[in-house]
Image (cartoon, rainbow, N blue to C red):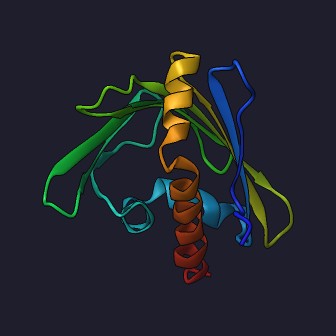
C-alpha cells in the first residue's frame, strides 16, 4: 500500500520536504496542531505545554513500552492560524541536534487541505541519519491518525 505522506530528500541537502493531502477542511487540519487534546491523540504523547503564539514554546512527553519517558520540545517562532507554524524541534537526551520546521497549511477545496513541512537539519549527515530510522513510516502513521481522529470532529 502506497504511503499518502510523501517525503522528498535530495542527495547532498540537509533538508526534507514532507507533503500530505488530507480529506479534511483546512480549519480542522490546523486544529490537529493547535489543540493540545488532539495533539496528544495523534502523536500518542502527553502535552505538558503548548503556547501557540510568536515566541511561544511547547513541551511534550512520551513513554516507551519499557516505561522510559522521552521529552520533545521547541520554540514557536511564527504562528499564523490556518496558514503556518515555524518552530524548532528537539528530541531531548538524544544525539540528534535541534531541527527547524516550517509547516504550511493550504486549502485545496472546502473539504480537503494540504500540509507541507520543510524540515532543516544541522547537516546532511544528521538528515541522512534521521532517514535511516523508520521516520517515513512513523510520520505516515501519524498523519493517518490525524485523518482518522479529526474526521470524527466534522
> At which x and y percent is residue 75?
40, 29
Q: Quadrant of residue 127?
A: top right
> At which x and y percent is residue 73?
33, 36
Judged left or right of residue 48, residue 111 is: right
> At which x and y percent is residue 84?
64, 40
The total number of labels drawn is 0
Residue, far left: 67
Q: Is residue 140 above or below residue 134?
A: below
Residue sitting at x 37%, y 42%: 51
Residue, far right: 109
Judged left or right of residue 95, residue 143 is: right
Residue sitting at x 31%, y 41%: 72
> At which x and y percent is residue 47?
29, 54
Judged left or right of residue 58, residue 128 is: right
Residue sitting nearer the eye, 154 or 45: 45
**Which quarter of the figure is the C terminus placed in?**
bottom right
Residue sitting nearer the eye, 133 or 47: 133
Q: Is residue 54 above or below residue 115?
A: above
Residue sitting at x 39%, y 69%: 41
Q: Is residue 80 above or below residue 29?
A: above
Q: Quadrant of residue 7?
A: top right
Residue sitting nearer the eye, 81 or 117: 117
Q: Quadrant of residue 128?
A: top right
Judged left or right of residue 154, residue 19 is: right
**Which quarter of the figure is the N terminus placed in?**
bottom right
Amino acid at each position: 500500500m502506497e504511503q499518502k505522506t510523501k517525503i522528498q530528500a535530495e542527495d547532498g541537502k540537509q533538508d526534507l520536504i514532507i507533503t500530505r493531502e488530507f480529506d479534511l477542511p483546512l480549519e480542522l487540519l490546523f486544529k490537529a496542531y493547535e489543540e493540545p487534546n488532539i495533539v496528544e491523540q495523534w502523536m500518542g504523547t502527553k502535552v505538558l505545554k503548548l503556547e501557540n503564539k510568536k515566541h511561544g514554546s511547547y513541551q511534550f512527553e512520551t513513554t516507551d513500552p519499557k516505561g522510559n519517558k522521552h521529552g520533545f520540545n521547541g520554540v514557536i517562532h511564527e504562528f499564523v492560524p490556518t496558514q503556518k507554524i515555524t518552530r524548532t524541534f528537539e528530541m531531548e537526551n538524544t544525539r540528534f541536534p535541534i531541527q527547524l520546521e516550517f509547516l504550511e497549511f493550504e486549502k485545496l477545496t472546502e473539504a480537503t487541505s494540504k500540509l507541507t513541512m520543510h524540515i532543516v537539519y544541522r547537516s546532511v549527515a544528521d538528515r541522512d541519519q534521521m532517514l535511516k530510522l523508520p521516520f517515513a513510516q512513523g510520520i505516515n502513521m501519524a498523519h493517518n491518525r490525524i485523518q482518522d481522529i479529526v474526521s470524527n470532529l466534522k
